[in-house]
Image: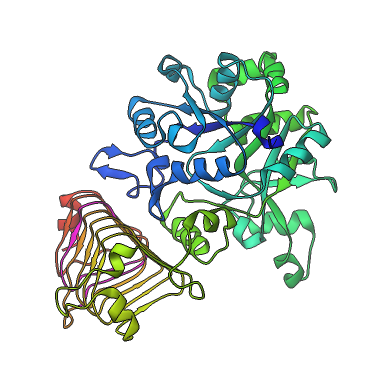
Amino acid sequence: MSITAEVVGIGLAGGQGVRARPLTLKAPGYLRSKAAMSFLGRRLIRWVMQILTAEGMKDFYIIAHGKENRYQIKVMIGYGEEFGVNVMYSPVKYDVLSTGSADSTLRMLEYWDLTGPCLVFPTDSIIDFDLEPMYRAHLESGAAVTVAAMTRAPDQVAEKYGLMLTTPDSRILEFVEKPTLAELREHFAVHEESEFDRLPLLTNEGFSLIDARALRGVAGTADIAALRRSRLDFGKDLLPWLVGNGHPVYAHTVRRIGDLGNVEDFLETMVDALHGRFESVSRLLGPPYDRERRVWIAPESLAMRDALTGRTLMEKLEEGLVTLGPAVRIGRYCEIGHVVMISESNLDDDIEVREGALISRSQVRDGAIIGPGAVLRDVVIGSMSEIRSEPSNPTVIERDVALGDEVVVHAGVHLAGDIAVYPRLKIPAGISVPHGTDLTGPDDVLRYL
């Protein structure tokens, strides 16, 4: 048995998905769990479970919060039977007591009587790592906590990620919350711009190996008890407190962790995964249709004929009438018209892409219809949405626009620049929506006509 089987998983699934709207909106006023978001044809929590199970973990404890959150996750992974593992859930009665992720974790360590190594993980992020070397480093250092760290450049860190300052042997000395570029320059005292740009900065990505016995030991201290009465979050409260009070907390660099909390990050992680930059995802995607261009096509879609030409997708690919790649995944029963171009994108199941459409760096969910000549760049299209378009009056949607489920966009509309359209709205021709706008209801739509 692998040494990693000693590590149990504690999944933090209490987030309500507010920051990721409309990706997490199933209907107006109804948020799906972030763990239930679709990523490359699977729900996020299923990706996480498969990745961690592949690392040898066998036992998982899910800390959920709220009836809907708990129900959605239980529907997706059950009690672990499909994955060959054991899954348990936090009792509903403790939801009301929670003052943060660390507070809930400490309470559940006691409830489940866990005393060994645990990997605390978010259920809404994709990780690419090897657990065994991280666990061995954790044991050798005697750490109370070993934080999975990702190396990022200063311009990636500034005002977005918390920074960890460490000793040469990776012991964490300080957490710096979302520093600005000016603060980073001042701290590291690097005057050459090129040298500053290459600084390898360590960020906390939410995955941590913990010594359950050690954390249960600090749970009863007066300081922690006082913090728990108001808020005890892992990254903001518990880890800085442990470091500040001399407890051994170490960083361990992993290959990559994908943040999926907003449209820009979601698409960046998706494109990275399709290009093979997440080994953990590549292993689970299966063999590609075109290995060189990294194109995956379900057999059912290869055999689908489009209504206009009657040719199958396989025939159109062989005749050069459709261009796919690089980095494309097409799910089952998708109908792809002729002269369609798709690159760096994921299409889920039962999607229709009509003639002349262009899709680049985009996610298209189940059942969507993309009209003739439509242009989609850097966007997320929700399930059952319809992008009406005409070759002489094409619809263009680009630059971090997200459409919720069952949205209808009429021909000729141009949406660009960090716009969110909530589920079931109809976007008429002639609308002019400013950059950064959320269209949450019909009144918003009327305002910009």
Residue 194 appearing in the image = yes
In the image, is 375 to the left or to the right of 202? left
- What range of the chain is rendered magenta? 394-416
> Closest to the observer: 331 or 257?
331
Q: Name the quadrant containing residue 229.
A: top right
Q: Is residue 310 left or right of residue 53?
A: left
x, y percentage for residue 205? 60, 45
Relative to 159, is 57 above or below?
above
> In the image, what residue occupies the spot 47% across and 51% down?
260
Can you say whether 419 is above or below 117 in the image?
below
- Please count the marks in the image: 0
**Would residue 379 be counted in the magenta stretch?**
no
Q: Nearer the viewer, residue 99 or 15?
A: 15
> Is 353 on the left or on the right of 122, as rendered?
left
Coloring scheme of the render? Answer: rainbow
Q: Is 52 situated above or below 383?
A: above
Quadrant location of the N terminus? Answer: top right
- On the image, the x and y values in percent for residue 285 come to 47, 57
Q: Nearer the viewer, residue 280 or 195?
A: 280
Quadrant assignment for the C terminus: bottom left
Magenta segment includes 402: yes
x then y, percent, for residue 18: 38, 41
Q: Is residue 420 visible?
A: no
Task: Identify whether 85 is placed above or below 402.
Answer: above
> In the picture provided, is 202 more to the left or to the right than 328?
right
* Residue with the most extreme right position: 168
Q: Residue at x 57, y 53 (%)?
A: 280
Q: Position of residue 128 (x, y in %)?
A: 60, 52
